C-alpha cells in the first residue's frame, strides 16, 4: 500500500486526487494539507511514502521543503505536480531532490504510472508533452538554459515571472533583498537576457495556456 500525502493550496486538487485514487486499491490517500507549515506535524502523525506537492505555495519554499524531506525523512519520495512548465522548472527541482515533476495536464493513468515508478524504483520521472512520461533523466545534461539554473535561482525566477517585487521575494524565502538582487542578476546572465522584460517574455513562451 502506497501512503500518499498531497500538499496543494487548492481544494479542487485534493478532490481530484480523492476521486482518482478511490479506484486504486494499492494507494491510500492521507488527509491533504494546504500550507507548508502543516507538513512537519503531519509527517509526525502519519507514515508517508510519497509527497505530491504544488510548486506554487503561499509563503512556502519548495526547495526548502525538498531539503527538509531529504534531511529528516529520506525515505519519502517527492513529486512536484504543477501548472508551471516542465521545460523551465523540472531539471532544477529534480536536482534539489524531487523524484518527479508532472504537469497538472498529465492524464490520471500516467499519474498513477509515475507514482508507482517513483515509489517502487526511486528513480526520476517527468512529464513529456503532457501525454507521456520520460524516464532516465540525466541531471548533468541541461536541455536548455533553464537547466543551468540552480534550485534557488529557479525558485527566484518563479517569483519574478509572477510579478513579485524583491522585498516580497525576500520575505517569503527568508533572505535579504540584496541576495535576491544578486540571484536576479545571475539569472539574467545565465539566460542571456538584458533586462526583466526580456526575461519575462522569454520565459512566458514556455507557460502552457
Image (cartoon, rainbow, N blue to C red):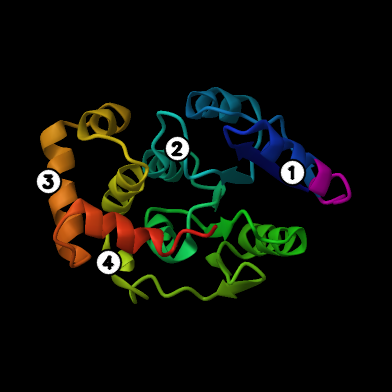
Q: Residue at x 55, y 43 (%)?
A: 53
Q: How crowded is mark 3: few (under 14 residues within 10 Å), some or many (20 or more)?
A: few
Q: Give the range drawn in magenta.
A: 19-26
Pointer 3 or 1: first along the chain: 1
Is the residue marked by circle 1 packed among few (<14), some (14-19), or many (20+) residues within 10 Å?
A: some
- Distance in Å between CA atoms under marks 4 and 2: 27 Å
The residue carrying mark 1 is: 17
Is residue 188 left or right of 143 when viewed as pictured? left
Image quadrant where one finds the C terminus:
bottom right
* Residue bearing mark 3: 182
- Residue where numbered disc 4 is placed: 148
Please report contact status of discs 2 and 1: CB closer than 8 Å, yes or no: no
| Disc with the residue nearer the chain's start (2 vs 1) | 1
- State which mark lies toward you, 3 or 2: 3
Chain-order first, disc 3 or disc 4? 4
Report the side of 96 relative to 9 (left or right): left
Amino acid at each position: 500500500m502506497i501512503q500518499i500525502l498531497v500538499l496543494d493550496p487548492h481544494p479542487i486538487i485534493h478532490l481530484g486526487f480523492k476521486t482518482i485514487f478511490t479506484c486504486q486499491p494499492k494507494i491510500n490517500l492521507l488527509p491533504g494539507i494546504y500550507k507548508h507549515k502543516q507538513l512537519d506535524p503531519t509527517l509526525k502523525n502519519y507514515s508517508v511514502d510519497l509527497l505530491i506537492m504544488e510548486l506554487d505555495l503561499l509563503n512556502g519554499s519548495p526547495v526548502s521543503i525538498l531539503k527538509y524531506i531529504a534531511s529528516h525523512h529520506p525515505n519519502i519520495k517527492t513529486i512536484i505536480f504543477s501548472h508551471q512548465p516542465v521545460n523551465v522548472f523540472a531539471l532544477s527541482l529534480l536536482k534539489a531532490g524531487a523524484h518527479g515533476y508532472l504537469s497538472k495536464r498529465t492524464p490520471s493513468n500516467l499519474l498513477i504510472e509515475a507514482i508507482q515508478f517513483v515509489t517502487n524504483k526511486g528513480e526520476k520521472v517527468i512529464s513529456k508533452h503532457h501525454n507521456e512520461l520520460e524516464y532516465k533523466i540525466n541531471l548533468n545534461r541541461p536541455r536548455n538554459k533553464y537547466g543551468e539554473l540552480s534550485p534557488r535561482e529557479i525558485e527566484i525566477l518563479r517569483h519574478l515571472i509572477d510579478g513579485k517585487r524583491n522585498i516580497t521575494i525576500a520575505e517569503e524565502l527568508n533572505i535579504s533583498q540584496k541576495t535576491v538582487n544578486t540571484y536576479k542578476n545571475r539569472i539574467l546572465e545565465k539566460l542571456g537576457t538584458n533586462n526583466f522584460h526580456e526575461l519575462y517574455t522569454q520565459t512566458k513562451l514556455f507557460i502552457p495556456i
